[in-house]
Structures are given as structure tokens and as C-alpha cells.
Image (cartoon, helix red, strand yellow):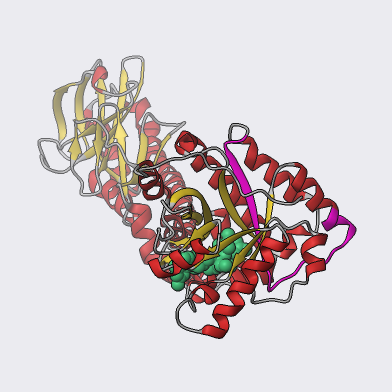
Amino acid sequence: MPLSVKHSRRTPVRLALPWLMGTVPLLLGLFILHWQAERELHARAWQTAEQALAQFNLMLDNVAASTELLLPLAGQPCDGVKLALREQVTRRPFVRSTNVAYKHHLYCNSLFGDYSETINPADYVDGKLRLMHGNPITPDQALLVYRQSMGEQTAMASLDGFHLANALRMIGQGEDLVLQVGPVWLSADGAVHDTPVPAYAVAATSRVSGRYPFSVHTGFAEGEPWRLMMAHYPALFGLLLFFGILTGGVCHWILMRPRSPHQELQRALEANEFIPFFQPVVRGEQSHWAGAEVLMRWQHPREGLVRPDLFIPLAEDSGLIVPMTRALMQQTAAQLAPHADAFEDGFRIGINICASHCQDLNLYDDCRAFLAAFAPGRVTLMLELTERELILPTDTTLLLFEKLHELGVLIAIDDFGTGHSSLAYLRQFNVDYLKIDQSFVATIGVDTLSGHLLDTIIELSAKLDLGIVAEGVETTEQKDYLLQRGVDFLQGYLFGKPLPLNEFIALLANQPDKTTNTLHPVAN
Ligand code: C2E
Ligand code: CA
Ligand code: CA
């Protein structure tokens, strides 16, 4: 039963929406966490670089203080100054060796005393600082040499690479931190590199010393924000996942919860799922197709084709029958109009109308719009009103029927014989046709009492000058019986079942004999 279907709207969008609603908060949360982690890494890198800068400035301050002191001694004989050189090594923190030179000739060293080596000031960045892989005494031990000169006098002091690398390790604490002096740089493992300084993918930060010609660089490798997130925010991850699943679940529940029949019908109406089927109405001995009754079907996405008696009563109760009928009339006109050439003149299109559709004049507009889709005279519209649901004769309904007749629309009482319509009623609404209920037709040749009733209805219609349609004709015996009694139009499985448009049009085109279809004269 389509109206109790729980998950009747499994369109791709509806299936995808809960996933979307679930993943959006998750992704948004992850994005924010990632952004937060990046910010934290940037702050950390900045702090690291600042600390390293301060530490190396401090170290070099010590070294510079010793060269400051030794500079005036440069040029004096080594024997006289070597003690002062050694004193600086001993007393100054970080100072590993001291030297004095005169006219670019290094002649005295704190370790050896007399020494001889030519110095090229160009080897020193800004003439002041040089980061070396090692020296002849410790070839594999990095060292940073600070040079201070005044005229011909030069004093130099070296700082052990061990202290520098140690500082890089201690301050860096896991992240990469290097010290750059000119074209070379020192890494935390104590090695000096003459390649370009590493380019860090995340939070790359550089700080240049304002006092000495060196800089420090730090940053993180690709993926570090994710590693940080994994390590620091596992609870938030769990929370995000929880909210993602919750949002997705709630969305799924909202979309898939059972809908009320009214909502389900409303949805189906918006999705154009109510479609017309056409059952031929035939005429005369030859049974040529003189018209069709439009019967609504629900093309349900899951349940397939649904019979009208399963949903029409609900549509009537919910008030949706009126827009549904209107949509059906529009669809019918749009579908039949291109094939109207195959119709006889006055081809009768029967539409089932319920009482609530007759409470205002909108039905008049609906019929006018329907007829406007066809050339004048090509089709005759017949509204079928079931006898079980009689319309109250108010001013509006009487005016409506009057206007409908002016438009050439015929009124038929459907299922005639099952309700209580009086003669006065038939006259009041100016009824044109009676549709004999199929239960009477089914009794032909079977039940004499009902057969008598059928005959009475046929006679009555003749007396009242009403046209007559017999529905539910299934056998040739029924057909012959009705034709003998002058019943104008016949409808039933004997001639054709309700069909979708293409099949109906294909069969209509194959009709052998098309004589002119003039309507039974009706008393108006
Ligand atoms: P109805 O207006 O009396 O329509 C005739 C019903 O009898 C149709 O059933 C048709 O398929 C069926 N029928 C036709 N020939 C034979 C036959 O030889 N033997 C048998 N056993 N049945 C035959 P369907 O299409 O299931 O429609 C059922 C009812 O639903 C209709 O009865 C009508 O009251 C209602 N209905 C259908 N479409 C609409 C619509 O668009 N609007 C409204 N308000 N009601 C509709
Ligand atoms: Ca009908
Ligand atoms: Ca009927």
C-alpha cells in the first residue's frame, strides 16, 4: 500500500543528504582543528626561532667580549699576549680558542702560542662571522669564528659547534631548527651544510639577528598539523565523529520517517506521479472508438502502478483531489492534443470529477483550458460525477453547471443506479448522460430482477432524453443486449482496458471503420 510506505522517497538526493549532513560538520570540524593546529605550529615555530636567536646572540656576546678585550693586543709579540688569549678561553663561557692577527697574518693562538696562517677577511660574513666544518685540530667538529678588526689589528675567537648544535637540539625540541651563517648552515646533529637552507612545508619561520650576521630557520614537515591533531585532540576527534553521525542520523530519520498519507500524496502530486490511462468508449454495432474515459493511475516510484481505488478516497478526504484532477486534466490535454488528428469530431473525453471540485467556479477555468488545447469541435469534454456523492444545488454550483454547458461540456452521472439521485436532481443540474453502473451490466443474462432494473434505467433515460453509457461490458452477450435496447455508448474490457497513452493511440490508429461520430442528441 503506497500510503503506508516508509521509505518511499529514495531519490539519490534523499539518500545522499544524510551523508552530506553527517560529513559536513565532520569536515568543518576537521578544517577548524587543522587551522587551529597550524596556528599552534606557527606560534611554536616563532617562539623557537626567537629563543634560538636570543641564545646565539648571547653566545656570540661572550665571544665578542673576548675579542673586544684582545683586539688592542694584536700586533704585540705572541709571547706577551698568549697568556691573555688563554685567559679568555678559560674564563669566558663558550669560547673555545682565541687568536690575534696583524695585517691578515694570524701569528698567535691560545692553544699553540706562535702560529702562522693567512686570513682572508672575505671568508667572513660581513668580515665578522664564519661557520666552518672544522679546523686542523678538530677537522670534524663544527666551529663558529668571530672576527673583530681595527686597522691592521685583528682578534678572533671561536665558538665550539657542540654548543651550537646542542642549543639547536634543546630549543628545537622535535622541530627542525638550523643556524645559517652566510652560505652555510648548521643542523642539530652538528653537521655543516653548504646546500640551500631547507624549505619547510608548514609554519616556515626565519629570524635574522640584528647584532651578528646570522639567522635561524625553523618549521615543520608536510603533515605535521595532522600529527599534532592526532596526538593532541583525540577527544575532539571523537566528538566530531559523534556529532557527524548524530547529524547524519537525525537527517536520515527526518527524511525517511513515515509520512502522512496527505504528505505522501502531496509529494506524488509535485513529482507528477499521477498519470492518465485511457479506456475506449465505443459506439454502434461496429464498436468504433468514439471516445475515452480518463482514469487516474499512480506511477509510484517503488510500488509501481497503483489502482485509483487505493488512493482516490484519501485524496478526496485530504482535499488534494482537486489539484490532482486539475493536473490530470492538464496532462491529458498535453498528451492527447498532438494526436487529435486521429480522433473523430466530437471525440468524447470523460473525466471523473468529485463533488468538492464543484464548490467554486475554478472547474469552469479548468475545462476551458482543457478544451483550448484542441481545435474547436475536435473533442467533447464529459464530466463524470458519481451518483454516490451528490452535489448540493447551491447558487455557485448551479451557475457553474450553467457555464459548463455554455462551454459545451457534458455532465454524466457515473455509477448510476447505486445512489439516490432523483428526477428533480437530474433536471436541476441539466444532466446529459447516465453511466449505468457495471453491476447492472454484469447481471445481463444472469439475474432477471436486476435485468429488469437495467431495462428500467434505459427506458427512464430515453424518457428524460438523456444519453446513456453502459460500463463494464465484458461479453458479446452484454454488448448485443445493450445495443438492442438502443444504448448509445459502451465501455468495458470487451473493447479495451484502460491503457497508457502510446498503447491507446496505437490501437486507435488501427480502428478499421471511422464513421462520423455524432453525439446522441441531448435535451438541454
Ligand atoms: P469508474 O469511474 O466507475 O471507472 C470505471 C472503472 O471500472 C475503472 O476502474 C475501470 O478500469 C473499470 N472497468 C472498466 N471496464 C471494466 C470491465 O469491463 N470490467 C471490470 N471489472 N471493470 C471495468 P479503475 O480505473 O480502477 O477506477 C476505479 C474508480 O476510481 C473509478 O471508477 C473512479 O470512481 C475512480 N477514479 C479513477 N480515476 C479517477 C479520477 O481521475 N478522479 C476521480 N475523482 N476518480 C477517479
Ligand atoms: Ca467514471
Ligand atoms: Ca462507473
Up/down of 111 relative to 437, above or below: above
Closest to the observer: 290 or 259?
Answer: 290
Q: Is residue 265 magenta?
A: no
Q: Estimate the x, y position of residue 6 in percent, counting from the top left.
A: 48, 74
- Where on the image, by quarter, is ligand 3? bottom right
Closest to the observer: 318 or 502?
Answer: 502
Up/down of 482 relative to 108, above or below: below
Q: Estimate the x, y position of residue 394 in percent, counting from the top left.
A: 87, 62
Q: Estimate the x, y position of residue 304 in percent, counting from the top left.
A: 40, 64
Up/down of 85 relative to 41, above or below: above
Horizontal relation, residue 124 to residue 22: left or right: left
Q: Residue at x 23, y 21 (%)?
A: 123
Closest to the observer: 344 or 391?
Answer: 344
Q: Is residue 388 magenta?
A: yes
Q: Which residues are magenta?
A: 377-398
Horizontal relation, residue 198 to residue 346: left or right: left
Figure quadrant of residue 69: top left
Check the image and name the residue furthest to the right.
395
Q: Can residue 102 be seen? A: yes
Up/down of 328 relative to 318, above or below: above
Closest to the observer: 457 or 362?
Answer: 457
Q: Residue at x 85, y 51 (%)?
A: 399
Q: Residue at x 58, y 74 (%)?
A: 454
